[in-house]
Amino acid sequence: MKKTQLLISNGNHDASPAAIRAGYPGQWFPDSGGGYYESDVKGVHLFTVNTETYDSDTAQRAWLKKRLAEVTSDPAYAGKPVLVQGHRPTTNTTMDGQQASNPGLAADLSAFPQVVLFSGHSHLNINDDRSIHQRDFTSVNDGSMSYVEVDHGYQMVTDDGLADRFETPTAQALFVEVYKNRTEIARVNMAADKHDIYTGGQWSAN
């Protein structure tokens, strides 16, 4: 992966930003102490926010709003998206706001229609039409690399037949391509094996 640019965001299952800094290469998590930072991905601005502390972190909020205002007012950047990534979705956006938090993030991004916010946390299925939400800005649910969840009431096919499960053992991801006149997002299933998330009645997602 020497040619792959990795940019990590802090989530609710992580010990702390300090633990991430201690455990991974610095270029994967180049924050200055608060778990948030700015990156350049082939000329596109990407802001990583710490959604575990966003609403209560006045310094982080001031930094993001200031930088978004500067980037979006630059005539040389006109027409390009501004990408923002964080672990938790913000309120009243993707998946009807399920498992969302940080209403302050939604308020702060509402002034910047160029923003595309990527978030996960919920494990909810990215094939759902609600996984992309557009109003003042664009929000996208980026799924899960361990298991996904669907609305209750569906059944899944297992080696033992049909099972009433809302957790499905598949991994999902997004491929985002930024062109001069558009941004395309491909929703991808990384695996689709016919097995159950329970083995012998025991949870096996770990």
Image (cartoon, rainbow, N blue to C red):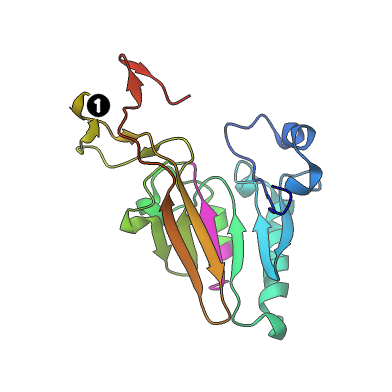
Q: Nearer the viewer, residue 112 or 116?
A: 116
Q: Residues within 10 Å of mark 1 (few under 14, many from 20)?
A: few
Q: Is residue 180 left or right of residue 173?
A: right
Q: Position of residue 10 (x, y in %)?
A: 64, 41
Q: Position of residue 66 (x, y in %)?
A: 72, 67
Q: Nearer the viewer, residue 1 or 132?
A: 1
Number of numbered callouts drawn: 1
Location of residue 14 (image quadrant): top right
Which residue is painted at 51% across and 59% down in the image? 175
Which residue is painted at 63% across and 48% down in the image? 54
Q: Measured along the vertical axis of the image, is residue 5 above or below residue 165?
A: below
Q: Measured along the vertical axis of the image, is residue 203 above or below residue 54?
A: above
Q: Measured along the vertical axis of the image, is residue 14 above or below residue 180?
A: above
Q: Position of residue 79 (x, y in %)?
A: 59, 81
Which residue is painted at 73% across and 58% down in the image? 38
For badge 1, the amino acid type reads Asp
Which residue is painted at 43% across and 69% down in the image? 135
> Magenta segment: does it hold 112?
yes
Question: Furthest residue to the bottom?
Answer: 75
Q: Position of residue 36 (x, y in %)?
A: 71, 50
Label 1's element? loop
Location of residue 157 (image quadrant): top left
Q: Is residue 187 left or right of residue 2?
A: left
Q: Is residue 201 left or right of residue 70?
A: left
Q: Nearer the viewer, residue 205 or 66?
A: 205
Residue 30 visible, this orientation: no
Q: Which residue is mark 1?
A: 159
Q: Nearer the viewer, residue 26 or 31?
A: 26
> Magenta segment: does it hold 163?
no
Q: Which residues are magenta?
A: 109-121
